[in-house]
Image (tube, grey):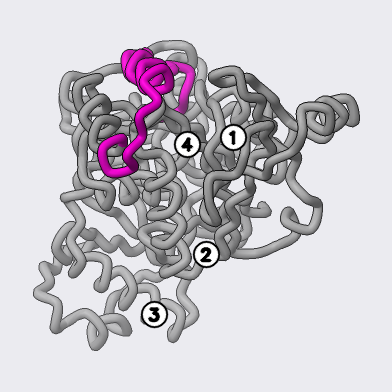
C-alpha cells in the first residue's frame, strides 16, 4: 500500500505556544530527514513579521477566494478571517514529506475527508491550565511592551477555552517547548501517545538502527508486530517494549551485529533492552505446533511501511494481525491483550476496508480458521478495557 503523507494540525488558545511548537517540531522533523512543509494560512490581518504563519489579503480578496473554492476551511477568530488552503497537487507526489500547520481541528477534519487516500491527518490541540497560559501572555506583553488592554483581555478570556474534544490528541502544553515538540514529533512519526516514551532509550533507538542494518545486509524482512503494531492499527493501548519479527528461523547470521549489546537469548526470541526480536515459527497454539503463522509471500507483500523513531521499517498488515490475535485470544488474565487489540483494530480501522477474504484464507493455511472466525464474530462491537493495558 502507498504510505500516506503525514499532515499535523496544531490548535489551541491564544498564547499557549502554537507558533513555538510549529517552529520546533518543523526543525526536529527536518533533522531526521523529513521534507517539512508549513503551509501559511490566508488571513485578513496584517503580517506580524518574517516568521508569521499567514499571508495577508484584503477582505475583498478573501471573499473572492472563498467564492472560488480555494479553501478547505475558513473561519473567523477575534474578528479576523482565516483560510486553510487546499493542498497543491505536486506536494502529494513528494516522498519523505511531512506537513505541519496551525489550523483548527475542524480544518483537519475537512482535510481528512478531502484527502483520505493521500494524507494521514492528525489533529492536535495544545492545552494548559488557564493560569499557565495567562502567565505566558503577561510575560509576552511585558517583553513586547504591548499596552493594548482590550486585546489582552480577549486573550485572557481565550485561555479559559475548553479544549476541542473532537481533536485526535489533546497535548499537554504545560511542559518545556522541547517536550511539547517531541510529543508532536512522535505523532507525525506514528508513535502513539499512549506509549510511554521514557520506556525507549537512545541506546534502544541505536540498537533498532543496527538491527535494521543487519536485516538489510542479509536480505531478511523485518517488521513490527505485537502491541506497537496493534497501536499503529488503532488499538491505542499502553505498551512498554517493542517487538520485531524477522523472516528467518535462525539467529546465527545476526549475532555478530548484536552480541556487543548485552543480549538475552531465549528459544525463539532475543531481548536487547526494551526490544524483543522474534524469529519463526510463530506458534498460534500452545498445544498444537501445526498451528503456526506463515510469513509467506502474501504476508511480505502486505507489509505496510511506517516510520518509527525516525527509522524506516514496516508493520504487519492489519489482516495478518487479525489472524494472529484472533488465533491466540489471550486476555488480560494472562497478562496479554489479544482480545482488546482485536476488538479495537476491527472497530477503529475505518480508513480502509479489512480484507476478510484474506483473513480467513490465511487462517485456513495456519490451521486456525475456526478460532479466527469465532473471534471476529464474538468480539467486534464489544469494548475490552482491562485495568492494566501494559504488555
Query: Label 2 to label 3, Cα distance in Å?
Result: 20 Å
* Residue occupying image coordinates x 74% and y 45%: 87
Q: Residue at x 31, y 35 (%)?
A: 141
Mark found first going from the N terminus, 1 or 2: 2
Label 3: which secondary element = helix
Q: Give the class, few, some or many, for how many residues have Cα within 10 Å of label 1's Cα (few <14, many ≥20).
A: some
Q: Is residue 81 magenta?
A: no
The residue tagged 3 is 213
Q: Earlier in the sequence, mark 1 or mark 3?
A: 3
The answer to whether the residue labelled 1 contacts the one labelled 4, judged by CB atoms less than 8 Å apart, is: no
Q: Earlier in the sequence, mark 2 or mark 3?
A: 2
Mark 1 vs mark 3, CA separation in Å: 34 Å
Which element carries disc 4, helix, strand or loop? strand
* Residue at 79%, 30% in the rendered image: 62
Numbered marks: total: 4
Which mark's residue is nearer the viewer, 1 or 4? 4
- N-terminal of the pair, mark 3 or mark 4, is 4
Q: Residue tagged by mark 4? A: 10
Kindly state the secondary structure of the residue where label 1 is placed. helix
Residue 34: which disc? 2
Residue 124 on image: x %, y %: 44, 32
Question: Residue at the location (42% across, 69% down)?
Answer: 31
- Residue 160 x/y as whole percent: 32, 14
Question: Gap in Å between the C-alphas at discs 1 and 2?
Answer: 38 Å
Within 10 Å of disc 2 (Cα), the crowding (few <14, some 14-19, many 20+) is some
Circle 1 sits on which residue?
A: 360
Relative to residue 221, is residue 314 depicted above or below?
above
Q: Position of residue 195 (x, y in %)?
A: 27, 41
Range drawn in magenta: 141-169
Amino acid at each position: 500500500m502507498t504510505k500516506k503523507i503525514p499532515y499535523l494540525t496544531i490548535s489551541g488558545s491564544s498564547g499557549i505556544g502554537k507558533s513555538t511548537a510549529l517552529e520546533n517540531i518543523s526543525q526536529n522533523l527536518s533533522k531526521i530527514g523529513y521534507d517539512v512543509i508549513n503551509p501559511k494560512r490566508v488571513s485578513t490581518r496584517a503580517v506580524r513579521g518574517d516568521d508569521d504563519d499567514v499571508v495577508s489579503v484584503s477582505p475583498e480578496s478573501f471573499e473572492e477566494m472563498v467564492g472560488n473554492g480555494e479553501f478547505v476551511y475558513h473561519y473567523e477568530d477575534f474578528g479576523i478571517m482565516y483560510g486553510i488552503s487546499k493542498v497543491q497537487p505536486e506536494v502529494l507526489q513528494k516522498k519523505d514529506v511531512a506537513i505541519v500547520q496551525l489550523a483548527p481541528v475542524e480544518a483537519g477534519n475537512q482535510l481528512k475527508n478531502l484527502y483520505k487516500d493521500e494524507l494521514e491527518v492528525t489533529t492536535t490541540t495544545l492545552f494548559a491550565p488557564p493560569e499557565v497560559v495567562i502567565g505566558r501572555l503577561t510575560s509576552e506583553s511585558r517583553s513586547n511592551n504591548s499596552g493594548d488592554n482590550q486585546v489582552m483581555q480577549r486573550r485572557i478570556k481565550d485561555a479559559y477555552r475548553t479544549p476541542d474534544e473532537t481533536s485526535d490528541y489533546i497535548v499537554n502544553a504545560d511542559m518545556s517547548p522541547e517536550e511539547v515538540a517531541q510529543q508532536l514529533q512522535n505523532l507525525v512519526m506514528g508513535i502513539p501517545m499512549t506509549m510511554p516514551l521514557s520506556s525507549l532509550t537512545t541506546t534502544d533507538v541505536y540498537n533498532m538502527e543496527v538491527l535494521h542494518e543487519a536485516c538489510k545486509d542479509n536480505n531478511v524482512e523485518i517488521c513490527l508486530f505485537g502491541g506497537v503494531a496493534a497501536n499503529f492499527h488503532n488499538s491505542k493501548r499502553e505498551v512498554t517494549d517493542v517487538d520485531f519479527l524477522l523472516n528467518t528461523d535462525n539467529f546465527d547470521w545476526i549475532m555478530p551485529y548484536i552480541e556487543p549489546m548485552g543480549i538475552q537469548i531465549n528459544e525463539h526470541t532475543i531481548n536487547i533492552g526494551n526490544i524483543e526480536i522474534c524469529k519463526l515459527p510463530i506458534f498460534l497454539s500452545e498445544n498444537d505446533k501445526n498451528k503456526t503463522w506463515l510469513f509467506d509471500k502474501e504476508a511480505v507483500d502486505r507489509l505496510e511501511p511506517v516510520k518509527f523513531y525516525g527509522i524506516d521499517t514496516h508493520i504487519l498488515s492489519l489482516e495478518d494481525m487479525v489472524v494472529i490475535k484472533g488465533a491466540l485470544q489471550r486476555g488480560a488474565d494472562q497478562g496479554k491483550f489479544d482480545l482488546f487489540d482485536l476488538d479495537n483494530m476491527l472497530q477503529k480501522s475505518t480508513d480502509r476496508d479489512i480484507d476478510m477474504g484474506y483473513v480467513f484464507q490465511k487462517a485456513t493455511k495456519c490451521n486456525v480458521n475456526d478460532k479466527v472466525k469465532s473471534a471476529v464474530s464474538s468480539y467486534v462491537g464489544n469494548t475490552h478495557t482491562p485495568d492494566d493495558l501494559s504488555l
